[in-house]
Image (tube, rainbow, N blue to C red):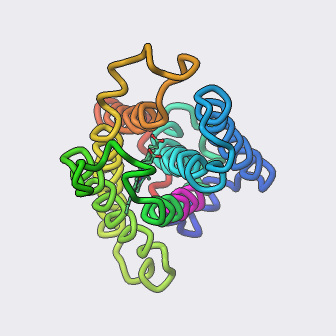
Amino acid sequence: MKKESASARASAGKAGLRTVATIVAVVMAVAFAYAIIRYNVIKGVPWQELPLFISNKAVALAAVFFIALSYDFGPLARFWPKVFVPELSTRKFFGLLGFGLAAVHASVSLLLFSPAYYPKFFTQAGKLNLTGELSMLFGVLAFAIFSIIAITSFPAVEKSLSNKQWQMLQRIGYLAFFMVMLHVLAMGFEGWLKPAGWPGGLLPISLVAFIAIALTLLIRAAVIIFPGNRNMPKK
Ligand code: HEM
């Protein structure tokens, strides 16, 4: 969800529409193919659950990938400017696309939220257990923080913020991404420790998301430790 000043746009150059469309198509195709192969094809989840239950997993994974892309391009451009500088202008688009998909995921999850779909979140009495309470708490917190950052991309809000304020707000996005890590850790951890139960040996989607976020946070840490080329457009 990066702010693009005119000068930053000029120096960053514009990624072609074709490149952006290709990245979007590839990420969506990979996320849906992974969810469908793991759950419908190998695990045998009925196809009637594809429209919402299984698609919701793909949408959640795609949201994580797009938000990760929006955060990774900046740090990567410091080390490989030729490859990644042209992509800097796409950060805001990928961030907002990821946020939009996270909103779809949250809405669909709430539509389906019941012991019949998600038995691991509920007690026998039909209340949330600790896994359900913690996992949903972190999901809601992450979504709330991402909402604040998304609001800063409204032109009127963007204009009213100083560069420093705007950059500080962007950085709390890393905190929101960390909350998503806790969201998937709380719900998935038990299953991660039992690889024998993974359909077709495929990693749980919660673990794939956890790894993608961990990599993003590591890349950010690497930039703090080894700043590389500091003359990159910040916005
Ligand atoms: C109000 C906010 C949220 C709610 C109510 C919510 C709800 C849920 C639920 C019920 C699941 C279990 C899905 C399943 O096992 O099929 C889930 C999984 C997941 N959520 Fe969220 N979530 C929220 C926010 C977020 C956000 C902001 C992200 C990422 C940007 C996210 C990413 C994920 C991922 C990657 C999974 C793992 C899917 C899987 O293992 O199949 N969630 N969420």
Against 196, residue 160 (above or below) is: below
Query: In the image, what residue occupies the spot 32% across and 20% down?
Result: 193
Query: In the image, what residue occupies the spot 28% across and 43% down?
Result: 182
- Dominant SS in magenta: helix
Q: Seen in the image, is 53 located left or right of residue 135? A: right
Residue 232 in sight: no
Magenta region: which residues? 93-103
Q: Residue furthest left?
A: 130
Is 60 in front, or is 66? 60
Q: Position of residue 160 (x, y in %)?
A: 38, 83
Q: Position of residue 81 (x, y in %)?
A: 58, 37
Against 54, residue 108 (above or below) is: below
Residue 212 in sight: yes
Q: Seen in the image, is 45 located left or right of residue 228? A: right
Q: Quadrant of residue 161?
A: bottom left
Q: Seen in the image, is 131 located left or right of residue 87? A: left
Q: Seen in the image, is 85 located left or right of residue 118? A: right
Query: In the image, what residue occupies the spot 61% across and 53% down?
Result: 12
1 drawn magenta: no
Query: In the image, what residue occupies the spot 68% across and 30% down?
Result: 41
